[in-house]
Amino acid sequence: MTREPKIPMSPSELPQQRVHEVVDLPPRPEPFDCKAGYRDYPSGSAPRNQPRNPTYLCQVEWAWSPMHNRLDAYYLHRGSSHWSLWSRYWDGKWEWVTAACVHRRGVTEKQAAVYLLLEFWKHEVRESDLDQFHWINEGEYISVAELMAIAREVWE
């Protein structure tokens, strides 16, 4: 069963944001030939509909104004040949969209989770001029410290 993201309704429900361990990311597999962004993916690389039993990675939020925000939860799906990153975004209800994929050969689950998210955010910076998230609402498979390490790679 897919874990539902919990939207924090007060600052006390957020994980610690300011003080966190500085960690290194796992080594990047070479080659890491991934596809990132909202596009058509190679046949069989990602499920056509929402994935079954994906690994819940994290949830982050951007809040530019009271009426302009973005809330994304990320999941990793292990397919028969590919890892696929899924973004589940809030639009009055949770919607699913494929965000990135990479062939599984030589790529561990942790490497796929970290580097698919990193490459998807880099894609969003290039295509949409996305700035760094404002809050980490939940760290699950990817910890708060790892999310901050990914953010340093993408936005600094």
Image (tube, rainbow, N blue to C red):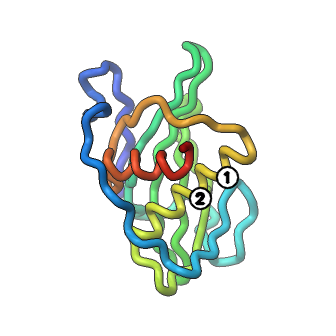
Neighbours of disc 1 within 10 Å: few (<14), some (14-19), many (20+): many
Screen quadrant of the C terminus: top right
Asked whether, in this view, residue 102 is left or right of residue 54, the answer is right
Q: Which residue is mark 1?
A: 123
- Identify the residue at image location x=42%, y=31%: 135
- Disc 1 marks which amino acid? His
The vertical placement of 62 against 112, above or below, is above
Q: Which residue is mark 2?
A: 119
Nearer-the-camera pick, 135 or 155: 155
- Disc 2 marks which amino acid? Glu
Judged from this view, the residue extending furthest toward the top is 66
Screen quadrant of the N terminus: bottom left
List x then y, in percent, for residue 129: 70, 38
Query: Secondary structure beneath disc 1?
Result: helix
Asked whether, in this view, residue 87 is left or right of residue 56, the answer is right
Query: Secondary structure beneath disc 2?
Result: helix
List x then y, in percent, for residue 106: 47, 85
List x then y, in percent, for residue 134: 47, 29
Nearer-the-camera pick, 153 or 102: 153
Real-space Cα separation, disc 1 to disc 2, in angstroms: 6 Å
- Identify the residue at image location x=53%, y=30%: 62
